[in-house]
Amino acid sequence: MTEEEPPEDLSHAGAVVDKAIEHMIGQNIGALSIASALLGGAMALLARSVADEAIVQILNNAIASVRSGELRGVGGTRG
């Protein structure tokens, strides 16, 4: 995947997701359930929006971030 400018509405979408997470936590929904539901929804949206190979690349990037410790703030910055 090439480096591209983030969409203008990415920050807004992120804020909406953050609020949804806060709401679910307030409803005593477990973190694993929240994360699984968000991931499932994201995967379904991607499947309707982009080619399978693009999804594979996105998942490979996510795997690399987990392995490098980036998601936990080790070995890189979050973002």
Image: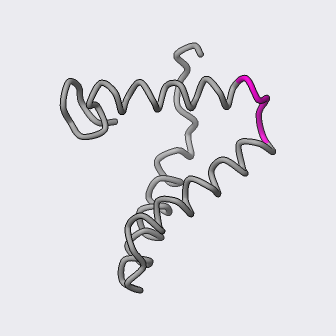
> Does 3 appear in magenta?
no
Split into 4 quadrants, where in the image is the C terminus? Answer: top left
Q: Position of residue 1 (x, y in %)?
A: 59, 16
Q: Is residue 13 above or below residue 57?
A: below
Kindly identify the residue that appears in the image at 56 percent across and 63 percent down. 37
State which region is magenta: 49-53
Q: Position of residue 33 (x, y in %)?
A: 48, 68
Total numbered badges shown on the rendered structure: 0
Q: Is residue 78 above or below residue 67?
A: below
What is the residue that sits farthest to the bottom in this orientation? 27
Q: Position of residue 71 (x, y in %)?
A: 31, 38
Kindly identify the residue that appears in the image at 20 percent across and 24 percent down. 75
Kindly identify the residue that appears in the image at 24 percent across and 30 percent down. 77
Q: Residue 15: name its quadrant.
A: bottom left
* Pick the front one: 46 or 4: 46
* Pick the front one: 69 or 10: 69
Tell me how the rendering is colored.
one colour
What is the residue that sits farthest to the left in this orientation? 74
What is the residue that sits farthest to the top in this orientation? 2
What secondary structure is the stretch in magenta mostly built from?
A: helix
Q: Is residue 37 above or below residue 42?
A: below
* Pick the front one: 49 or 69: 69
Q: Residue 69: name its quadrant.
A: top left
Kindly identify the residue that appears in the image at 28 percent across and 36 percent down. 78
> Does 51 appear in magenta?
yes
